[in-house]
Image: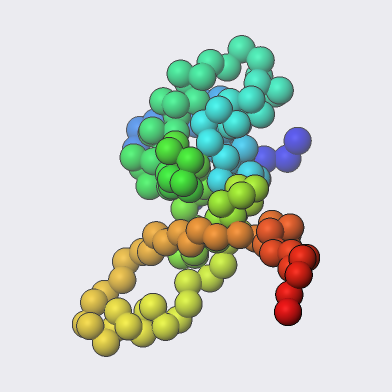
Amino acid sequence: MTESRSPDMVSALRSSGRRLTPKRALLLRIIQQNAHLDAEEIYRIAQQDRPQIGLATVYRTLALLKEMGIVRATDLGENHCHYEVLSGDHVHLVCSKCGHVKDIPVPSALFKAARSEQFAVSRTHFEMFGLCASCADSEAPSFEGDCD
């Protein structure tokens, strides 16, 4: 399998005096390829490649990557963290029924509002909860019965 990890992540680990171990490289690759997974899901995927990896290793690595600013942990309404590689600012649209998460660009109006308040934005963190199109369609009210 081809390594698709960012050179920035590798250099961030190395410049902090930490090694890019095979387990760390595996976990980075999993997070890059599968945004919004929780630690248990990352662990299950990692075990397919390295059955000997422990859940504690996953949690320690996630904490390290978060501390270093390589990944972001987000609560998407399930009372536990989901992880993604820090990249451009975006908004999470989270379906409250099926759990699907879609990333969309931050609306420029938010940046415009911040500028009008003379506020310099360094990064955004924003989730919107509701129903995705599929779940909304299945939730459509039925109007059967007597209507006069």
129 and 29: which one is in front? 129
Residue depicted at x 38% and y 33%: 64
Q: Is residue 125 left or right of residue 45?
A: left
Q: Quadrant of residue 120?
A: bottom left
Instruction: Report whether residue 97 is seen.
Output: yes
Colouring rule applied to residues = rainbow
Which residue lies most toward the top here?
Answer: 52
Residue 98's spot in the image, x, y percent? 65, 48
When the figure is inspected, residue 140 is found, relative to residue 74, above or below; the finding is below
State the quadrant of the C terminus: bottom right
Q: Quadrant of residue 15?
A: top left
**Does the rendering let one see residue 7?**
no
Q: Is residue 118 left or right of residue 109?
A: left
Q: Is 113 on the left or on the right of 1, as rendered?
A: left
- In the image, residue 25 sits, relative to residue 125, either above or below, namely above
Image coordinates of residue 59 in percent, x first then y, are 44, 26
Quadrant occupied by the N terminus: top right
**Numbered disc total:** 0
For residue 17, side relative to residue 45 (left or right): left
Percent x, y for residue 71? 45, 45
Residue at 48 percent across and 72 percent down: it is 106
Q: What residue is drawn where x is 44% and y is 36%?
A: 80
Residue 73 or residue 145, whichever sits in front: 145
Q: Quadrant of residue 110?
A: bottom left
Q: Residue at x 76, y 70 (%)?
A: 146
The image shows residue 39 at horizontal and vertical percentages of 52, 31
